[in-house]
Amino acid sequence: MILIDKKLNEIIFKNDEVNKIIDDLAAKIIKFKFNFSNLIIVGIKEGGVALSDLIHKKVKEGTGFDCLSGYVDITLYRDDSFAVKKTVKSTEMPFNINDKDILLVDDVIYSGRTVRAAIDDLICFGRPKSVKLAVLIDRGGREIPICPDFTGKKIKIPNKYDVKVELASKNKFIEKI
């Protein structure tokens, strides 16, 4: 489900709606006609990992290609003091990304700073041929010029609220808060 602000617990999309948004997002990605044998799907920890797993599965089902997949932990690349309080986990990229097409995946885009940090992390692993961005929710409010190539849903939410996506695991959504 997708909620506005953890304190309010206002659900804006229920599970069936989220499934439809993910299906539509995956269809846009498949329609783009990537060279799927050259594609690596990379989730941004934390929220983008479950979504990237779902997109990876749907791309495989829709194209027959089992793309490589991984994830990045942006903790060391954040540009705010919040990162100091976080524990560094791990980035999982056990392959060469040079000359590969990267599909970077996150659940929500807001300021663009998370995506900027993820790109900085990616570049440490090599020089990809291209980097495209897929997000489930685009809530606007950019502070830096980053724009998704594939968007599930655009919504307008006041800046004072957070948007929380709860994807439990591969293709299963949490039913309650």
Image (spheres, grey):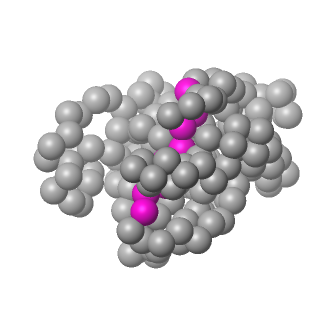
Q: Is residue 63 above or below residue 121?
A: above
Q: Between residues 29 and 67, which one lies in front from this camera angle?
A: 29
Measuring from the top left, give residue 111's x and y in whole percent. 41, 67
Q: Is residue 33 left or right of residue 85?
A: right
Residue appearing at x 20%, y 48% in the figure: 83
User: Which quarter of the picture shows residue 67?
Assistant: top right
Q: Quadrant of the N terminus?
A: top right
Q: Between residues 99 and 164, which one lies in front from this camera angle?
A: 164
User: Which quarter of the picture shows residue 19?
Assistant: top right
Task: Give the prevailing secondary structure in the magenta stretch.
Answer: strand
Q: Between residues 159 and 47, which one lies in front from this camera angle?
A: 159
Measuring from the top left, give residue 140's x and y in whole percent. 53, 71
Residue appearing at x 62%, y 29% in the figure: 175
Q: Which residues are magenta?
A: 161-168
Measuring from the top left, give residue 113's x and y in whole percent. 37, 62
Visible residue check, residue 3: yes
On whether residue 13 falls in the magenta region, the answer is no
Q: Is residue 153 left or right of residue 147?
A: right
Visible residue check, residue 26: no
Q: Is residue 140 above or below residue 123?
A: below
Q: Is residue 68 left or right of residue 28?
A: left
Q: Is residue 85 left or right of residue 156?
A: left
Q: Is residue 59 above or below residue 5?
A: above
Count of picture labels: 0
Q: Is residue 108 above or below residue 170?
A: below
